[in-house]
Image: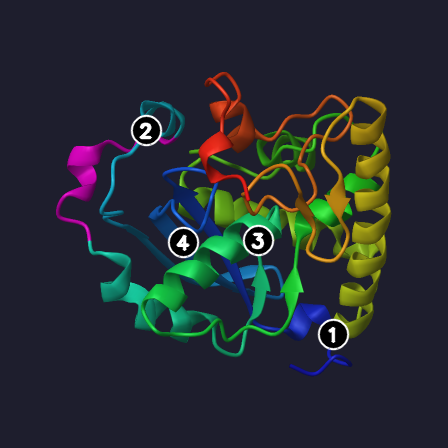
Amino acid sequence: MDDDARFLDCPTAVIDVETTGLDPRVDRIIEIAVIHMQGGVVIDRYATLVNPEQDVPEEVQRLTGIEPAQLTNAPRFAEIAAEVRARLEGKVFVAYNLAFDRAFVHEELGRAGLDLPSRRYVDPLVFVRELHKSEGSKRLTAVAERLGIPLASAHRAADDAEAAGLVLYALLPRLPERLGELVMLQQQWEITQKNEMANWKGDRGGGAIDQGIGQTLDRGNALGPAYVYGDDTDPVRAMFVHLPDAGAARRV
């Protein structure tokens, strides 16, 4: 991927996954979407339910509307892994709250003996946190509504992925034009946000942030820097926060 290319000219694969839980090492994908976009236009849509080969918690069923019976005859990820990888090849990997989706796709491809081909990653959430810093919730549903972007079925992979891509393109007029500069700014802002979050968590006695891998040290998940920003709570984390000692069995 040419860093000097205009991002608008770059082919992108916007990814969203729904999962059985928060830990990509033990939890599994139950739905994945790969939406190809270029120049702010949807070029191709791919979405499928996935048989996770494990139980789906009731909290996930309520959040997504996906019931176990719908997954019984769905393909296992190993059966679609080559297709998913092919759809990522030569594309900029885009995902809202990137660390979560990338970690799950990486783990699922790895189980199938495949690598993650993308070499450039863009997270619209990083830009939202800066450009919408004083505009309320950073949740995808709220941001899409502010920008006038339709999101018919939140927490379903295809609709979430398409909305995430459209959010990114809507923000582009306020961002660098070239891919390399866009990624560099993202990295700078992400570091700033991690430091702010580390300070926020420190003031409240939360876990420290590992600046090297972008994970909270007291949790074994791939959410990267905590999604809580001000009063905004990650909808996935919120799904489990009421459970007794959520995630304790997965700590490292």
Indicate whether residue 66 is drawn in magenta: yes
Magenta part of the chain: 64-74
- Closest to the observer, 109 or 126: 109
Which numbered circle lies on residue 6? 1
Q: How far is mark 1 from mark 2, CA to CA? A: 42 Å
In this rendering, which labeled residue sits more in front, label 3 or label 1? 3
Q: Secondary structure at mark 3?
A: loop
User: Which residue type carries mark 1?
Assistant: Arg
Residue position marked by numbered label 4 in the rendering: 33
Q: How far is mark 3 from mark 1, CA to CA? A: 19 Å
Residue depicted at x 21% and y 34%:
68
In the rendered image, the quadrant that contains the N terminus is: bottom right
Which numbered circle lies on residue 157? none
User: Which residue type carries mark 3?
Assistant: Ala
User: Which residue type carries mark 4?
Assistant: Ala
Q: Are marks 3 and 1 in contact (CB under 8 Å)?
A: no
